[in-house]
Image (spheres, rainbow, N blue to C red):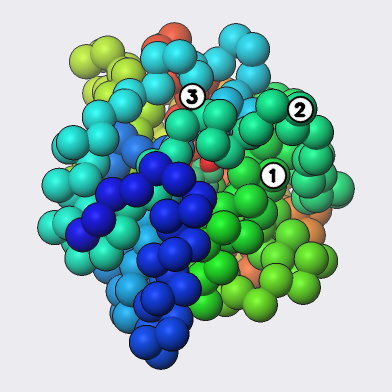
Amino acid sequence: MQIVETIKQVRQIIALQKKRGKRIGFVPTMGALHQGHLSLIRLAKKHSDFVVVSIFVNPTQFGPKEDYKKYPRNLKKDAALCQSAGADLIFSPNVKEVYSKGFSTFINVEGLTQGLCGASRPGHFRGVATVVSKLLNIVQPDAAVFGQKDAQQLAVIRQMTKDLDLPIKIIGAPIVRERDGLAMSSRNAYLTLEERAEAPALYRALQLAVSMVKSGKREADSVKREMAKLLYRDAPLGEIDYIEIVDNEALKPVKQVKKNTLIALAMNFPSARLIDNIIGA
Ligand code: PAF
């Protein structure tokens, strides 16, 4: 497995692999890798012959009061994890390599980015769409894998890929959870012991939603009410940012939970913002 820092190096290596007839898989990350990321790399490997992982903490997707500076960076550890999961190449550029002097082109996916996390993180998806479009253009993979945990990000990237006619298969990968149900996230490491003990309540709220739907209680408002009650009771250190029940493509609120309905929530704990979701039963 090679680690390179420049766009030129990536392009040279990919050109060679393509010449050899290899299908290229791609997993964009911001590093601080965990088992969730490794599952993305393994899935990419199933869909391709040569897997590229990018490790880049993208400044344009962080708000001014967010954790860009303190976001964990440990290339050595990440590289070892990538290798263990079967990655073939790491692209780890610095900020200047990605955003050259005078950079002034941004991608804005409209509509989809208004609600859910977009409402409380203005500009976040503009930064994500911009960096992902650049990375896809640099790597030019056949397939790229993104986690379902960031369901809105996945929807935005699918839309962008379609709108820009990018010939890339976008693959969503299932959420990987800790034993107590907490969705794996690099930001879980910020949680205090007390917050960590409360954090699995997010998944329990989603499970409660699923069990309500299974018992025929499909009305979105009452599902949301019961989820909120559980969170107030079991996670008092956190503050609910949103609980939304939307269709999984347009991300528009629905009145009844159906098969393709996304139940998503975000909570702000003093040390970290956590998100989670499930596709309705
Ligand atoms: O999901 C992430 O880690 C980031 O948003 C991504 C897709 C790597 C873009 O910076």
Residue 102: mark in rendering: 2
- Mark 1 lies on residue: 130
Q: Which of marks 3 and 2 is nearer the N terminus?
A: 2
Question: Where 237 falls versus 99 (above or below)?
Answer: above
In this picture, residue 45 sits left or right of residue 19: left
Q: How far apart are marks 3 and 2 (CA)?
A: 32 Å
User: Given contact means CB atoms under 8 Å apart, are the residues at marks 1 and 2 in contact?
Assistant: no
Kind of element beneath mark 1: helix
SS state under label 2: loop
Q: In this view, does 253 lie above or below 121?
A: below
- In x, y percent, where is residue 158? 67, 64
Give the number of the mark in front: 3 or 2.
2
In front: label 1 or label 2: 2
Mark 3–mark 2 contact, CB under 8 Å? no
Question: Which image quadrant: the N terminus?
Answer: bottom left
Residue 6 vs residue 89: left or right? right
Side of 45 relative to 148 (left or right): left
Q: Residue at label 3?
A: 273
Is mark 1 in CB contact (under 8 Å) with mark 3? no
Q: Distance between the residues labelled 1 and 3?
A: 22 Å
Residue appearing at x 42%, y 55% in the figure: 9
What residue is rendered at 40% in x and 76% in y? 16
Q: What residue type is labelled 1?
A: Thr
* The residue at label 2 has a CB less than 8 Å from ligand 1: no
Which residue occupies the foreground of this view, 29 or 117?
29
Percent across and percent down for residue 62 are 60, 24
> Amino acid type of disc 2?
Gly
User: What is the three-letter code of the residue carrying label 3?
Assistant: Arg
- Residue 165, image x, y percentages: 77, 73
